[in-house]
């Protein structure tokens, strides 16, 4: 006999790259199953979660069923992960922080944990690829869409040596078309990164490549 019932209190810890989408993905199933929730939005992108909570109240969601607690991971995320009254934690973000939530569960009440952690995603291009221009366009889009700030971004290119040089030239040509500027201007493909800390992290990869003797192809 299978009995489906709400698990209890669900803690949801959100990333900053898709704040409204990730919120909807997590609260929809949990609330539909009859659970109550405590949601910690990323400190960089809290306003959408707070607005959804206001709309939920207007829609008649009972008080205490959907709760938003803002703050940093150290202040709020860890407290939720260790809380004895939280029955399940769902986290989207870095692999390092995902490991912490598994430890939090082990150190508290063995709460269930659902993780969506960072990826390292390859684009693989074989020698018989028919249209390298289309491939190059897709490679650039996979790498830079949403400023590259998503866990499924193409972060590695594995390509057959017979077509490597031609493909790289086409990739450079497509990458030059991605203008950077005001993201509200449809002529621009790229806006700013989320904050100074993330900018420093991304820039550090370029510096690391230079130190390792790698070739900088563009920019």
Image (cartoon, rainbow, N blue to C red):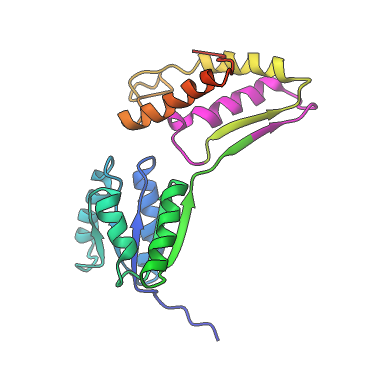
Task: Indicate the position of residue 27 as horizontal and vertical percent values.
Answer: 36, 59
**Does the magenta run of residues contain 133?**
yes
Residue drawn at x 22%, y 51% as measured from the top left = 70
Range covered by the magenta-colored residues: 123-151
**95 lies left or right of 78:** right
Residue nearest the viewer, comparing 99 with 92: 99
Q: Is residue 97 above or below residue 87?
A: above
Residue nearest the viewer, comparing 136 with 94: 94
**Does the magenta run of residues contain 109?**
no
Q: Is residue 41 above or below residue 170?
A: below
Residue drawn at x 47%, y 31% as measured from the top left = 148
Task: Identify the image quadrant of residue 81.
Answer: bottom left
**97 lies left or right of 151:** left
Q: Is residue 144 above or below residue 48?
A: above
Task: Indicate the position of residue 144 as horizontal and vertical percent values.
Answer: 49, 27
Task: Indicate the position of residue 99 as horizontal and vertical percent values.
Answer: 45, 55
Task: Indicate the position of residue 35 as horizontal and vertical percent values.
Answer: 34, 70
**136 lies left or right of 96:** right
Residue nearest the viewer, comparing 33 with 199: 199
């Amino acid at each position: 006999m299978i009995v489906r019932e709400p698990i209890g209190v669900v803690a949801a810890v959100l990333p900053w790259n898709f704040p409204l989408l990730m919120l909807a993905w997590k609260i929809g199933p949990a609330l539909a199953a009859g659970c109550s929730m405590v949601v910690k939005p990323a400190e960089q992108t809290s306003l959408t979660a707070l607005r959804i909570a206001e709309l939920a109240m207007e829609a008649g969601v009972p008080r205490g069923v959907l709760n938003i607690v803002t703050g940093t991971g150290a202040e709020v995320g860890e407290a939720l992960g260790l809380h004895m009254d939280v029955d399940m934690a769902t986290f989207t973000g870095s692999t390092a922080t995902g490991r912490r939530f598994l430890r939090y569960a082990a150190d508290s009440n063995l709460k269930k944990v659902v993780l969506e952690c960072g990826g390292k995603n390859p684009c693989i291009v074989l020698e018989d690829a028919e249209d390298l221009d289309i491939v190059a366009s897709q490679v650039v889009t996979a790498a830079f869409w949403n400023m590259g700030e998503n866990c499924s971004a193409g972060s590695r290119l594995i390509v057959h040596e017979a077509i490597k040089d031609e493909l790289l030239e086409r990739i450079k040509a497509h990458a030059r078309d991605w203008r950077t500027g005001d993201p509200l201007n449809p002529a621009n493909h790229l806006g700013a990164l989320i904050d100074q800390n993330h900018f420093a992290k991304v820039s550090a990869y370029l510096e690391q490549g230079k130190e390792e003797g790698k070739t900088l192809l563009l920019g």
